[in-house]
Image: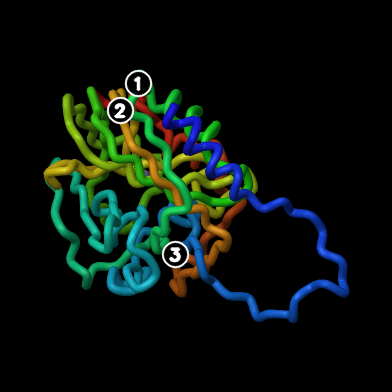
Amino acid sequence: MNVAITMFFALGCAPTYEPVPANQQSEPTQVTVEDALVQFSLVAALAAGDYSGGPSLREVLANGDFGIGTFSRLDGEMIVLDGTIYQALADGTLRTADLNDTAPFAAVTFFAEDGHFDLADEKFATLTALDERIDELLPHRNFPYAVRLEGDFAAITLRSVPAQSPPFQPLVDVVAHQVTWQHQNVRGVLVGLRCPAWVGKLNVLGYHWHFLSDDRTLGGHVLACELRSAELLYDECTSLVIRLPQSREFEEFDASEIDDQDIDKIERQRASGARP
Ligand SMILES: [Zn+2]
């Protein structure tokens, strides 16, 4: 019941997209970047092995308090929540990141709730089932969303990757050696983005979830989960801002060498392809 009421509220606020006659249009305005998803580099450049440089983590936080990414030399999974950057390392530990480090890839926004759904009475046996349910709930298909899901997990499978040394290998090869863990009975937050079908090689198509436990001891990129109950908050982003790297690696990056299947394999190599 709660879900239905909340959904009605969200849909009731949806814009109608009717064309506005020219004589009723407002004054021209300069493009603003309010409500933006701010992205540093392209996921395809990361996939190609561009793991160095990028903005400082201070600069990441200057552009958002919520999001995901990775660190210099691919040293762990980045979780940005409530203005703090957490680093989930390949040894299974979680720490607050050193703000002097850099982010070769990150996507953040200032999370401003546009709506929420109470999923307290819904259970999800798989991450795919959760993704499909959220697809039903989010109001629009062609906007990026930041999604914050606070949940009670019966089980969750996380991964991280160890720091790399030059010459950097493509991410699909690094992920083949990812470290995974499964945890039972843990409460925490899924920090996620959902990017629409037009995103191409810019970011990850569909959902990209990172996890942070409530006690701040566990974190990582989510490969699978079983969810008992949750509260979901979302922020619809009406702009996408991409800051391109000024680096030799980016100059040498050839987008034609990265195909969408590689990106999908990197981000969605869920439990079936992971080491136990
Ligand atoms: Zn990730």
Element type at mark 1: loop
Instruction: Report the residue at 34% width, 23% height from top.
Output: 121
Above or below 273: residue 40? below
The amino acid type of the residue labelled 3 equals Phe
Dot placed on the residue nearer the N-terminal end, 3 or 1:
3
Question: Looking at mark 1, is its residue's CB closer than 8 Å to ligand 1?
Answer: no
Q: Give ligand 1's quarter of the image.
A: top left
Instruction: Left or right? Give the position of 151 relative to 98.
Output: right
**Image quarter for residue 125?**
top left
The amino acid type of the residue labelled 1 equals Lys
Q: Where is mark 2, residue-wise?
A: 229
Instruction: Report the residue at 75% width, 76% height from top.
Output: 26
Instruction: Left or right? Give the position of 58 relative to 146.
Output: left
Instruction: Left or right? Give the position of 142 relative to 177.
Output: right
Crowding around mark 2 (Cα neighbors within 10 Å: few <14, some 14 to 19, many 20+) is many
Element type at mark 2: strand
